[in-house]
Image (tube, rainbow, N blue to C red):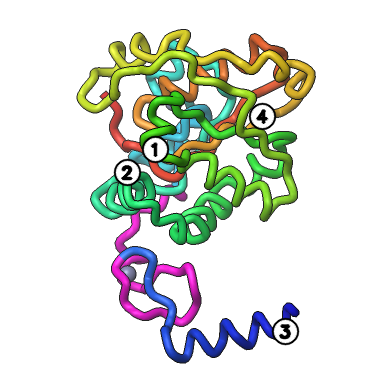
Amino acid sequence: MLAIRQVARAALHLILPPLCSSCQTPVSTPHAFCHTCWGAMQRIDGAVCVQCGIPFPSPVLEGEKCIHCSADEPAYTHVRAAATYDDLSRALVLRLKHADQTDLIPSLGQLMLSCGASLLMQADLLVPVPLHYTRLIRRQFNQSALLARWLAEKTNKAVATQILVRHRATKTQGHKKRTERFKNVRDAFSVHEQAPPLIKNKNILLIDDVMTTGATLHECAKTLLQAGALGVNGLVLARVALAE
Ligand SMILES: [Zn+2]
Ligand SMILES: [Zn+2]
């Protein structure tokens, strides 16, 4: 069965070559980026804040905390982002969110897998940042849950898409300043009534598509820790490099 599928896939690639996940030019392997897009992508692989993962301008700051994490420590232990949120990653995230282009999941998931290998290894359970149900109904899927499921499958980890609940619809964070963003999501999350035994003493890895100030991840981590989790880390696809 597998052999037939492989032959069928190879034949399909002869007729329809795989396309770059970003610009749609032909590439040699499916779910890959072409050389131009790969080169243009601002992957985060240098010195970052040891806690929130914001890129530092200089490698001498490696192992340090940024001013925000030093002044007001987030509830999560470590967050890592695969790329800077720029025009290229924004276009990919928008396609994923609003156009049901779920075929993007393997290429975006692969970026997160490479960047978050050690966080994934430490995790007992992967938990996507939830959408409020009204937004879920409108969009029909949660892009972070799709990424979390893909990552869980690749790393043989458990994933739980229902244990964290966004019980309050929050206003879009769009143009809000840092303090407003934290206020906007405060107490917006809770855990499902059956969740505590599943998360007790577990290392949880939150999965999300975009991080700006980390207010949402902080709030989710706080909720999970209050419900008995041992520790909470986060892995996101893209993050804003300079949060206000
Ligand atoms: Zn491309
Ligand atoms: Zn930081």
Picture layout, residue 192 above or below residue 31: above
Q: Name the residue under label 1.
A: 210
Q: Give SS at disc 3.
A: helix
Tag on residue 85?
Answer: 2
- Label 4 amino acid? Ile
For the point 32% across and 66% down, the residue is 37
Tag on residue 204?
Answer: 4
Task: Depth check: give the residue in front, 88 or 170.
Answer: 170
Predominant secondary structure, magenta span: loop
The magenta-colored residue range is 23-45
Count numbered badges in the picture.
4
Q: Is mark 2 within 8 Å of ligand 2?
A: no
- Label 2 amino acid? Tyr
Of labels 3 and 1, the one closer to you: 3
Identify the image quadrant of the N terminus.
bottom right
Distance between mark 4 and mark 3 Cα atoms: 37 Å
Is 224 on the left or on the right of 107, as rendered?
right
Q: Mark 1 or mark 2: name the one nearer the start of the chain.
A: 2
Q: Mark 1 or mark 4: name the one nearer the start of the chain.
A: 4
Q: Give the crowd class for mark 4: few <14, some 14-19, many >=20 residues within 10 Å.
A: many
Q: Mark 3 or mark 1: name the one nearer the start of the chain.
A: 3
